[in-house]
Amino acid sequence: MALNALHYFNLSKPSFSAHPLRRTLGGPFVCSSGVHRDEKDGNLGAISLKRHNLGKQNLPSSSDFYRSLQSEFQVSIAELMHGSGIAPQRVFGDMNALVTGIQIDSRKVRPGDLFICCVGSKTDGHMYVGDAIRRGAVAVLASKMIDFDEISSCGAVFIVENTNLVLSIVAANFYKNPSKRMSVIGITGTNGKTTTAHLVKAIHETMGIKTGMFGTVGYYINGDHPQLEVPNTTPDAITVQELMAKMVQNGSKALVMEASSHGLALGRCDDINFNVAVFTNLTRDHYDFHRSEEEYRNCKGKLFEKMVDPNRHHKVVNVDDPHSSFFLARGNKDVPIVTFGIENKDADVFPIWFKLSLSRTEVLISTPGGILEISSGLIGKHNVYNILAAVAVGISIAASLEEIKRGIENVDGVSGRFEIIDGQQPFGVVVDFAHTPDALARVLDTVREMGAKRIITVFGCAGESDRGKRSIMTKIAADKSEVVILTSDNPKTENPLNILDDMLAGVGWNILDYVQYSKHADSAHLPNGHRLYVHDIRRVAIRTAVAMAEKGDIVVVAGRGHETYQLEGNIRRYIDDREECREALHYVDKLHRAGLHKPDMVMRESQISFCKDVEAWNASKGWNDPSLFATVC
C-alpha cells in the first residue's frame, strides 16, 4: 500500500474546518529569539498587473471595484499634466480631452482612460497602445514615438522622457492626493512588517481612528477583513492612490502600509505623504532584484528620506539591528525619533522581561511614558520585536499606554505568521511565512526554546528569486532541525529540481549525491546526525512530516504562510499549508497505517519514482517529465 494509500485521502480540499485553538507544550519560559519578508514584484509593463486568484477566498476583482471609484474623478488631460508639473517634450491632439481613469494595463482600459506606457522588466507598454485605444483610451502618455496609424483615433498623445518616473505623480494628482488627508505610517524592513502593521492598525482603531492597511496578507479598505486580492505587498502606483482615495471617501483618517523594497525602488511610494517611517530589521533577501545588500538597504532608506518635517514626521527604528544608524541618519536629523530594541537598553522602548510559551507571550515594557504590561497571543521572540515596534509607533502618534495595550492585545494572531495548527495532537505544528535565512533561523530558534524534543522542518525556495539564499537556508534548517524535508515552494518557470539542487549545496551535496546516498540507506544522514529527505511534491512532504512526528516534537512548515496557491510553470494550483497540515492531522492514524511514520518512508514508491525523475533530469538537463508533480497525487 505504502504511499499509494494517499490516493484515498482527499488531497485537494480539507474535510473539516480550521481549529483556532492553541495548546501549550510545557509551561512558559524566559527566552531569546524569530521574524518575516518582502515580495518579488511584478513588472511595470502594460500587461504586468497580475491579480492573484486566491482559490477559496472570495475577494472581489479589482477592476470593477476601481471603476466605481474612477467614475467619481475626471479632469482634462491638460489640467492633469499641469497639476502634475509635467512639461511634455511633444504633444499631439486635443489638450482638453477628458480623462476619467488611468491604466497601465491595456487589457483593463475602458472608455475615457488615460493609458500610460510604462516599461517593465518583461514587457513594454508601448507595444499595446493600439489595444488600449481600441478599448477606448482617450489619451496616451508615452516615452517613445508611436506609430501614428495606431493613434489616429486617440484624443491626445503626450511624449515625456520617462513614463515610469511620472506615473506616481500623475496618479496622485488624478485622485487629488489622498495621502495628504490621512496620517500614513510606512513600515519597511526584511521581516516583521505584516505583524507590526496589524498591531499598529489595531492601536489606531482602539483610539477611535478609522484605519486602512496595505500589506502582504490583504488590502483593508473599509473594515476588519481584507477586501481586495493582493498582487503585491505594496500596491502599484495607480492602485495605491486609487485605494487611498476610496479610504478617504469611506472616512478613514489613517493608513498603515508595508513599504517593500520593490515598492520603494519602483516608485510606488514616491507621492505618498508619510507621517511615520518604521524600520524593523534588515537581512538578506531579494538579491535577484537588488544587486547587493547596499542597494537593498538604500531602497528601504528612501522611506526615511521622506522624514524632513520635525513638526509632522517621526522615525521609529530598531536599534538592535546593525543597520539602524543608516536609517536614523536618513532625512532630517531634527525629526523626532522613537527607538526600540531587546538587547539595547538605551532604546526608548525595551522589555524589562518577557516570557514565551506555545500559547502566549508576556512582556513588561519600559516606555518614555511609563511601564506597560502586555499579554499577547502572538508567539515567539520575533513577535516581541514586533510588539515593541508597535508600542514605539503608538508613542510617536501620542496614543495612551492603555490604548497601546488594548490595541496590541486585540490582535491574537496574523494569518500564516507562526500560526499554530491544533488538532489536539501530542506534538506541535507551526506554519510560518519565514522564507529568508534570518526569518527561518529565528523561527527555528523560537521552536527550540519552546522545548521541542525534535524539530521536523519542511520548506522549499521560490523560483525566479535569490538563488544565493537557497543553500544558506538549507544549512540553517539542517543545523537547527533533527529532520529536514526539502520540497517545492513556487517554482514558477524554474525547474524544481534545479532549485532543490541549489538547496542541497547547503549541506555540500547536489541532487545526484542525494539520490545515490538514499538508494542505500533509509534516509540521508548528515554529519551532525540529523536526517534529510527530499520530495518535490509539497503536499507529500507535509504529510510525511506530520506522520513522522511523535510526542513532544514540533513540525515547522515554512516559507508560504498565508499563501493559497502554488505556481508551477504557467499553472496555478490551490494549496494552503495550513489546510494540508490539518488534513494530515485528521488522517494521521491512516497515515501511520499506510507506513508513512516509518524512517524508510521516503524510500517507498514515490521516492523511487522521484529518483527516476532526477536521473532523467540529469540526462536531459531539462524539465521533460510530465509526471514530475504527479508521482503520488
Image (spheres, grey):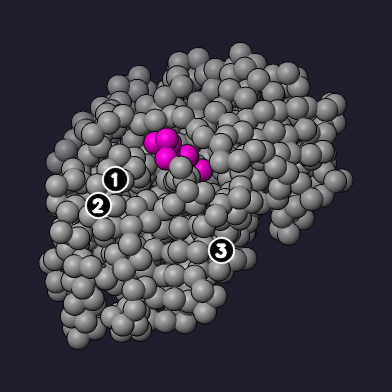
Above/below status of 569 relative to 472: above
Residue 525 in which image quadrant:
bottom left
Amino acid tagged 3: Lys
Residue 51 in which image quadrant:
top left
**Percent from the top left, x then y, of residue 400?**
75, 19
**Percent from the top left, x then y, of residue 171?**
43, 36
Above/below status of 394 relative to 567: above
Disc 2 vs disc 1: Cβ atoms closer than 8 Å?
yes
Provide the major secondary structure of the magenta segment: loop
Of the numbered discs 3 and 2, the one sitting upstream in the chain is 3
> Is residue 511 in view from this perspective?
no
Q: Residue visible at 53% across and 40% down?
A: 194
Amino acid tagged 2: Arg
- Say the numbered circle drawn on residue 480: 3
Residue designated by label 1: 589
Report the mark closest to the observer, 3 or 2. 2
**Number of numbered discs on residues:** 3
Q: Which residues are magenta?
A: 418-425
- Say the numbered circle drawn on residue 593: 2
3D distance between C-alphas at marks 2 and 1: 6 Å
